[in-house]
Image: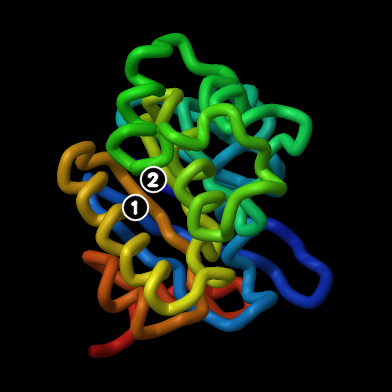
């Protein structure tokens, strides 16, 4: 289980949230600028909260003034909104970056049907292909937690629906705490086991 209980003063409001994620998909749903990405960045170690704690099972990843585990040691797969692929690296180099198991990385490429792109560069592939490459890279490190920040927003409808199925299939196999940020309510309802609505730093489960 991932447990997050943190506060962070942002420009226009105080981010103050408390939630847990089991071996499920949880969607952080809400308008732009509501604090969703700050939450992901805090869990990943990119942003430091002002107070509180972040724990995965028995391990403390962050506790105010006492613990702040470095990003590279948190075992978190993070798929950024713009995919953040290295433009000077081939697709294989992007996916294999930071992994310890090349055979596993190659199997991921086969599973996501991108193994034929191994020698290409990010600028030469489609948006849907970039999304799958970024997902493979996030999974190749064999993370304990998977986080996705608006991963489907730039995709066309057909590609988006296929990407939804890929994510659901991966979660069925991996069963790790997964957080997806989206502003699309229909998408959140389709993918997630549970929705958390966030507005100006306050987090609640929307009524259904």
**Front-lying residue, 190 or 199:** 190
Q: How many labels does the image show?
A: 2
User: Residue 113 falls in which quadrant of the image?
Assistant: top left
**Front-lying residue, 33 or 101:** 101
The reply, left or right, for residue 160 in relation to residue 155 is: left
Q: At 49% from the left edge and 17% from the top edge, which residue is drawn?
A: 99
Mark 1 / mark 2, whichever is N-terminal? 2
**Front-lying residue, 33 or 114:** 114
Which element is circle 1 on?
strand
**Front-lying residue, 102 or 64:** 102
Q: At 26% from the left edge and 75% from the top edge, which residue is drawn?
A: 190
Q: At 32% from the left edge and 64% from the top edge, which residue is drawn?
A: 162
- Residue 52: image x %, image y %? 57, 46
C-alpha gap between disc 1 and disc 2: 4 Å
Q: Which residue was labeled with disc 1?
A: 20
- Residue 56: image x %, image y %? 38, 33
Q: Is residue 192 above or below residue 190?
A: above
- Residue 40: image x %, image y %? 56, 52
Whether residue 68 can be seen here: no
Badge 2 crowding class, 10 Å Cα cut-off, few under 14, some 14 to 19, many 20 or more, is some
The reply, left or right, for residue 122 in relation to residue 118 is: right
The reply, left or right, for residue 119 in relation to residue 139 is: right
- Residue 62: image x %, image y %? 56, 33
Dot 1 and dot 2 residues touching (CB under 8 Å): yes
Considering the image in quadrants, where does the N terminus appear?
top left
Q: Which residue was labeled with disc 2?
A: 3
Which element is circle 2 on?
strand
Whether residue 134 can be seen here: yes
């Amino acid at each position: 289980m991932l447990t997050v209980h943190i506060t962070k003063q942002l420009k226009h409001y105080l981010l103050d949230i408390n939630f847990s994620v089991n071996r499920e998909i949880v969607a952080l749903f809400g308008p732009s600028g509501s604090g969703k990405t700050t939450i992901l960045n805090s869990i990943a170690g990119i942003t430091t909260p002002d107070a509180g704690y972040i724990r995965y099972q028995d391990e403390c990843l962050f506790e105010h003034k006492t613990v702040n585990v470095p990003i590279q040691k948190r075992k978190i797969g993070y798929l950024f909104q713009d995919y953040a692929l290295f433009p000077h690296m081939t697709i294989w180099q992007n996916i294999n970056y930071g992994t310890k198991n090349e055979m596993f990385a190659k199997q991921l490429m086969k599973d996501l049907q991108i193994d034929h792109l191994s020698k290409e560069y990010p600028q030469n592939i489609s948006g849907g292909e970039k999304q799958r490459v970024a997902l493979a890279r996030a999974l190749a490190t064999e993370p304990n937690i998977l986080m996705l920040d608006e991963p489907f927003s730039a995709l066309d409808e057909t590609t988006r629906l296929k990407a939804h199925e890929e994510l659901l299939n991966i979660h069925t196999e991996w069963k790790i705490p997964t957080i997806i940020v989206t502003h699309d309510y229909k998408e959140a309802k389709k993918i997630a086991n549970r929705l958390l609505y966030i507005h100006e730093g306050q987090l609640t489960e929307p009524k259904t």
